[in-house]
Image (tube, rainbow, N blue to C red):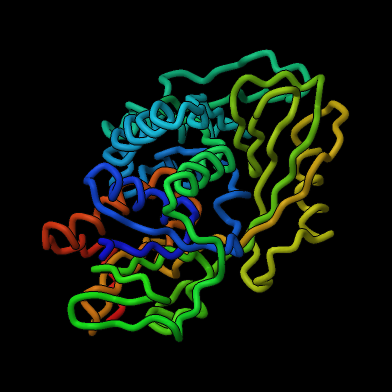
Amino acid sequence: MKDYIIVGAGLAGLCFAEHCHRAGRSFTVISNRSQNSSRVAGGLYNPVILKRLKLATYAAEHSDYIAPFYAAIEERLGTSFFHSLSIYRKLFSVEEQNAWFEAMDRPRLSQFMMPEILHPKFEYLPAPFGFGALQHTGWMDTTAFLDAYSDSLRAADRFIEGSFAYDDLQVNDDHVNYQGIEARHIIFAEGFGIRQNPYFHHLPLDGTKGELLIIRAPQLKLDVAVNAGVFILPIGNDLYKVGATYEWEDKTSLPTESGLAELTHKLEQLITCEYDVVEHLAGIRPTVKDRKPLVGSHRHYKNVHILNGLGTRGILLGPPMARELFESIEKQREVDPFVNIRRFE
């Protein structure tokens, strides 16, 4: 009998798989890759909520946790996907400059916010009021991570490609059985796919569609990420990710003309050089109404669990939320009420 069946191979599912690996637990991951939000994510990780200049809950602790977590995976798999990179927020007025200085005086924020307004010479990105700069930030090539990790699972015969058939799951008092695979526990980490899950579809995961572009702009020459309504993220070879949109009604993962128009309009308000759109991507973020993750166990089935709702902060939240669920199962610890699904019951 295995210890775990993990349904979903996005950031949430693979972060949980990593905790199983480190603890020597046996597991099988099942995924049909229908939910692509982890793959089309912008990839930036940043503990500071730039719109309100405040620290996200537990963000400093999570930031400390994820760097060694991902670094250990890079070393084991012999790949590179996790990169340090400063984020510059473009300031649009003296008032925004003053707000930056006020926020910087808060002790918990000061470790992430650089203590002066910067005026770098970005020839094709004018900023007369300068930039506020963040440190201890960066980006993750989520596709490289997901591909390398999934390939390692396939090589170890721990990965099943295919859709999960809920009707084939038998839940018993001390184990579950799925198409002949017996396990002590099952973890649902399906992202927006939760809407079809009979065990957890009652939870208020709305999903927010996001679109982004990959552009080629040889003249731009940015060596930092820039946030100014949209983000511009350099990913090498004169390529940049530009995003993202937020759409609450459309629940398809298809790129739209309106999304393209919104992103190009905002981009052209920022940069003055020529660019080409190389790719246009879209996905449904697993967002929850209260903007907190969904972590915990089913009310009636103690061996059926959920890890979901990482929203726009999956890179920062994936490892600590997976640890939260793993330790609640293995060490019988209560899941933090802040993220526990019991808050909806």
Relative to 104, 43 lies left or right? right
**In the depicted structure, whether residue 207 falls above or below residue 319:** below
**In the depicted structure, whether residue 45 falls above or below residue 37:** above
Relative to 273, 68 lies left or right? left
Return the x and y of residue 294 as percentages of the image width and height.
35, 66
Return the x and y of residue 30 as percentages of the image width and height.
47, 63
Q: Quadrant of residue 291?
A: bottom left
Residue visible at 83% across and 28% down? 272
Position of the C terminus, as image quadrant, is bottom left
Q: In this orientation, does residue 342 appear?
A: no
Q: Nearer the viewer, residue 14 or 2?
A: 2
**In the depicted structure, whether residue 46 falls above or below residue 321:** above
Position of the N terminus, as image quadrant, is bottom left
Q: Quadrant of residue 68?
A: top left
Return the x and y of residue 311 as percentages of the image width and height.
48, 57
Q: Nearer the viewer, residue 103 or 42?
A: 42
Residue visible at 11% across and 62% down? 332
**In the depicted structure, whether residue 154 falls above or below residue 271:** below
Residue visible at 63% across and 34% down? 92
